[in-house]
Amino acid sequence: MLSAKNLILAASALACVNATIVRYSMDQGAICDSHTYTGSMIREVYRRYCKYEGNRWKLGEYVLIERFMAEDQTKLVYLPLPMIGSDGNLDYGQSTDRFVVVDSDCSYYHVTRLRHMGRGGENEVGSLSYTCYPPMI
């Protein structure tokens, strides 16, 4: 669950995200700062929110943050990605500024991390999130 602070950061970031949608394979994993999320970690979060019903994946009921892309009205959904605990597993008790990005059909796009806003001002205009890229193979 997101803390109130992270929910506000997320809403702010989603209002300013660049319209470019980057797509990777979930199995590639992602690196956010010094944290490496494996494909199985991302899939674990994905399956908490996306359920296979009939012959397709569907979003569950507990999705907090969504945004429509202006160009084609693609609905992007941001699934909270927990921090990695000291045991190397996902710690669902910690709030996070990282998200698994999917569309309304649960098609995976990438992992993203929100940038933290400081005191701010006009010089901080721009994207408030960035894509966490897969590790180099």
Image (spheres, rainbow, N blue to C red):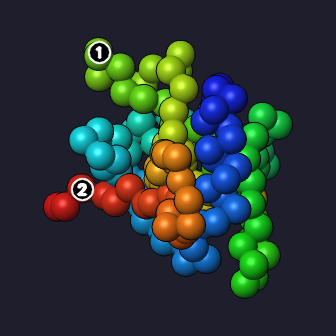
Amino acid bearing label 1: Asp
Which disc number belongs to residue 108?
none
Is residue 111 placed above or below 62 in the rendered structure?
below
- Residue 69 placement (x, y as % from top left): 72, 73
Which disc number belongs to residue 135?
2
Asked whether the viewer can see residue 92, the reply is yes
Amino acid bearing label 2: Pro
Frontmost residue, 27 versus 65: 65
Q: Residue at x 41, y 36 (%)?
A: 41
Q: Residue at x 34, y 60 (%)?
A: 133
- Residue 83 placement (x, y as % from top left): 42, 29
Task: Choose the circle earlier in sequence order: 1 or 2.
Answer: 1
The N terminus, quarter of image: top right
Q: Residue at x 51, y 33 (%)?
A: 96
SS assignment at label 2? loop
- Residue 86 placement (x, y as % from top left): 29, 16
- Residue 49 placement (x, y as % from top left): 67, 38
Q: Is residue 32 left or right of residue 131?
A: left
Q: Which residue is mark 1?
A: 87
Is residue 21 placed above or below 28 in the rendered structure?
below
Q: Residue at x 78, y 34 (%)?
A: 62
Asked whether the viewer can see residue 105, the reply is no
User: What is the C-alpha distance between the residues marked 1 and 2?
Assistant: 21 Å
